Image: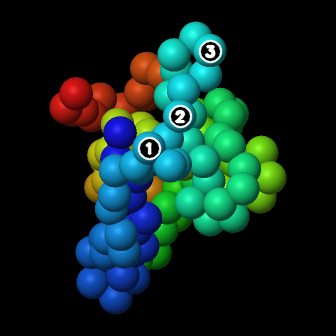
Amino acid sequence: MFHVVATLNRDTGNIIVITAYEPDDEHLCFRKNQKAIMKCVMCKRGETKPGVTSVLLTRDDFTLVMRDVPAEICEICSEDYIDGGVAKRLYHLADEIQHQGTLIDVRKYQTTPEVSCPVEG
C-alpha cells in the first residue's frame, strides 16, 4: 500500500506529487481481522478507520465534487487517505466529464462508474 500526497498545478493542469511513500511498520499495523490500518502521518497519534470523504478536483475552469468516496479517516485529526485505485478512477472520471464540456459536476461515488473509465489493478 502506497500513500501519495499530490496537488494540481492550475496553470498547466499537471499533477505534482509532493511525496509518495510506503508506510513502515511504525505507521502500518493490523486489526484483529488482519485488515491493514495506518497510523496517521499528519498528527502521528491517531489510527485510521474506514469511512467516506468528499473529494474536490479542479482543472482550468472545471470542478468536480465527488461525495461519499471510500477512505481511511484518522480518528484524531480526520485526515483522509484515499486508496490509489480509487484516486486513479476519480481522475479518469474527472477527465471524461471535463472532455464532455461540463464545467461543474457534483456526484456521489459509486462502485460502478457512470462513465466507463479503464482502471488497472
Give whichever of 6, 47 is nearer the camera: 47
State the SS at label 3: loop
State the SS at label 2: strand
Quadrant in which the C terminus is drawn: top left
Is mark 1 in CB contact (under 8 Å) with mark 2?
A: yes
State the SS at label 1: loop
Can residue 81 be seen here? The reply is yes
* Residue bearing mark 1: 25
Q: Check the image and name the residue furthest to the front.
A: 26
Position above or below: 66 against 77:
above
Query: x, y percentage for residue 31?
Result: 61, 22
Q: Given the image, on which type of amino acid does mark 3 rest? A: Lys
Seen at 37% across and 74% down, the residue is 18
Position above or below: 6 against 76:
below
Q: Is residue 59 left or right of residue 67?
A: left
Seen at 43% across and 64% down, the residue is 5
Give whichever of discs 3 and 1 has the lower sequence position. Answer: 1
The answer for how far apart the CA atoms under marks 3 and 2 are is 10 Å
* Residue bearing mark 3: 32
* Residue bearing mark 2: 29
Position above or below: 86 against 16:
above
Quadrant in which the N terminus is drawn: top left
